[in-house]
Image (cartoon, rainbow, N blue to C red):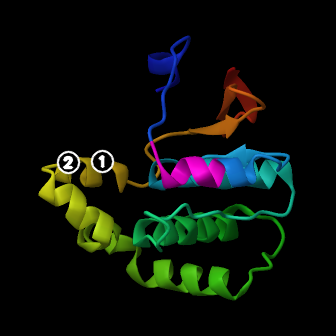
Amino acid sequence: MTEDIADKTIILTTTDGTRALIKASRAKHVLAGSFLNVRAVAAVLCQLQRDVLLLCAGNQDEFALEDALCAGCIIDELHRQSCSPLQLNDLGIVLHQAVSQCQESIPEMVQGSVSGRRLEKLGRVHDISYCSQLNLLDCVPEMGRGTSCNLIKAYAGERCSS
């Protein structure tokens, strides 16, 4: 995957995601996580050894099931990879427990969500199938200052491109 995008301009199109990134822009590290890179995100977070806030962007200022499930998957993977116990707030506990109960049916849950039904009406069911796959990618985008974005290769702990 890294070779496919090396030296290319990547454009992220989002509405609520943009607002979330702006809100998080003062943080020391702003990483982009999805179902596709859960394991990689957890690996980078473990390497950083810092407190973590998982920011779910939502959909049109509303709760989005897919965001919550993804956050729960990241928490679940952090439990697997972390050398020390996690300290979760109440929402983190609920998300972790929810994912523990439904991890095998995440694609179906995403498809049944408000966003999933909207994508289905638009004929984009294949987007749901692709985006709800777990751990397909081993890189994590990190927002930089200004317009820059780094791509971190999770398992080597090094930046692949900038």
Neighbour class for label 1 at 10 Å: few (<14), some, many (≥20)? few
Determine if the magenta segment contains residue 100: no
Going 30% across and 71% down the picture, which residue do you hit?
Answer: 114
Quadrant of the rendering where the C terminus is positioned: top right
In the picture of the structure, the residue carrying the numbered disc 2 is 126
Tell me the magenta residue range: 14-21
Tell me which corner region of the image, top left, top right, bottom left or bottom right, holds residue 115.
bottom left
Tell me which corner region of the image, top left, top right, bottom left or bottom right, holds residue 4.
top left
In this view, the residue in front, 127 or 102, is: 127
Going 56% across and 80% down the picture, which residue do you hit?
Answer: 95
Mark 2: amino acid: His
Q: Residue 79: x, y in percent?
A: 68, 71
Q: Are marks 2 and 1 in contact (CB under 8 Å)?
A: yes
Tell me which corner region of the image, top left, top right, bottom left or bottom right, holds residue 64.
bottom left
Q: Residue 126: x, y in percent?
A: 20, 48
Dot label at residue 130? 1
Specify the principal SS of the magenta part: helix
In this view, the residue in front, 83 or 134, is: 134
In this view, 135 is above or below 151: below
Q: Is residue 5 left or right of residue 47?
A: left
Neighbour class for label 2 at 10 Å: few (<14), some, many (≥20)? few
